Image (cartoon, rainbow, N blue to C red):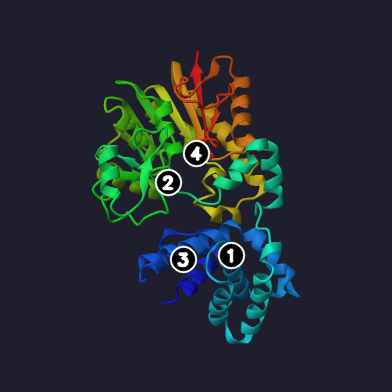
Amino acid sequence: MNPRSIALKILEEAVVHSFISKDLWKLTDPLDKMDRDFVRKIVYGTLRFLFAIDREVDRFLKEPRKTPRNVRNVLRLGVYEIMDTHTPAYAVVNEYTEITPKKLKGLVNAVLRKISTSTDKIELSHSLPNWLYTMLTKDLGKDMSTFLDKSKGHELSLRAVKIERNELLDELSSFVECYPMNYSPWGVLCKNGADLENYSFKSGDFTFQDESSQLVGISVSPKPGEKILDACGGVGTKTSHIVQIERNARVFYNDVNRAKILVAKSNFQRLALFPEKMMSFDVLKYDTEKLDAKFDKVLIDAPCTALGTLGKHPDLLLRINKKDVEKKAELQLQMLEKSWNVIKPHGELIYSVCTVTKAETDDVIFDFLSRHEDAVAIDPFDEKFPFTFNGLGVQLLRYMEGFYISKIKRL
């Protein structure tokens, strides 16, 4: 099977639905590992630089808006491969001309040939929507270049569970280059990715989790006997980590999404890390009677724009808009307000989001603190790491993925 034809099918579906589902990658199953990796590279790369690529393609089209969608997607893949891979340009032109519908082969051939001779003038640059580039440039300042660099790609991140990290490193070293994370004592990074789903993943030796996500569990810092609620537990990754850190903590999992709850149950069983109780209620409608008591700690891993994960989820640029930032920030503040009601005196509220906008990070915490005289933000890591705590929270972008963590203590 032609890997570029499969890449085209995946890209077309991603553009139509503004999302790459896990099932889409099953189209690559008949390919060998090298071709599977190639398809992932050009699809993810094309999506990541889609806005810049479209600007370049439009320069060589007489009527850009009338270009058939399937042809535009062929051109998008071709431009990315010309610009960001080691494949000779003439070969790229020939390959994409071959998979183009007969009536439009001449157009694709001509456009890609022109682009291939203009590569020194083409700048993929930031490739963000203009509104987002403007917002992040203002929010991040000198860290904007770091964000852009890290959003180009993402290494595979693991958390050792049933075996020690050194054992996991030894097991993986025979077929993938990997090394320990800098700050998480359980974390392993694998270069260039690897197909590990059918490896010791199923036995629970490890699970997939970014270092920034692992630092959320570290910031929760569970102690024996503490009653801890993971209020937006999702697929249970952070819940299981909190249990792993302190088996004698009383950890409660909660989520309203049935599909995620089912995945969480499967993950708890695979890892043999079980919360004391699994619940399903809307965080915005806390029922204190059902909760039966207040908590020592509540983790709000809130829904967000997820821009810190752009390196591994470039498809999010297809669906994010300016209003999303404002809506997410409003929702996040509401979640913090509701959660505050179920925290014991001297208890802690931990807030985390995998994004970098000021509106969803410092601004949310500032707004919350301004409403509560009995609340104070403290260093989420108790000065154990060299992260910059600005009095509201910690943005981890300079050290790993773009991820924000704040810890608020009830006085």
* Residue 26 placement, left or right of 150: left
Instruction: Give the number of the disc on residue 80.
Output: 1
Q: Secondary structure at mark 2?
A: loop
Q: Along the line of sight, which residue is nearer the eye, 358 or 261?
A: 358
* Residue 140 placement, left or right of 389: right
Spot occupied by residue 310 in the image (x, y as percentages of width and height): 54, 49
**Identity, as a three-letter code, of the amino acid under mark 1:** Tyr
Gap between marks 2 and 4, in whole Å?
29 Å
Spot occupied by residue 321 in the image (x, y as percentages of width and height): 65, 50
Q: Secondary structure at mark 1?
A: helix
**Identity, as a three-letter code, of the amino acid under mark 2:** Asn
* Residue at mark 3: 39
- Location of the N terminus by quadrant is bottom left
Q: Of tags 1 and 2, which is closer to the observer?
A: 1
Gap between marks 3 and 4, in whole Å?
26 Å
**Identity, as a three-letter code, of the amino acid under mark 4:** Met
Instruction: Give the number of the disc on residue 257.
Output: 2
Q: What is the crowding at mark 1: few (fewer than 14 residues within 10 Å), some, or many (at least 20)?
A: many
Tell which circle, 3 or 1, labels the residue nearer the N-terminal end. Answer: 3
Q: Are marks 3 and 1 in contact (CB under 8 Å)?
A: no
Tell me what residue is drawn at x 60 percent, y 64 percent: 83
* Residue at mark 4: 400
Instruction: Look at the picture and state if 352 lies above or below 20.
Output: above
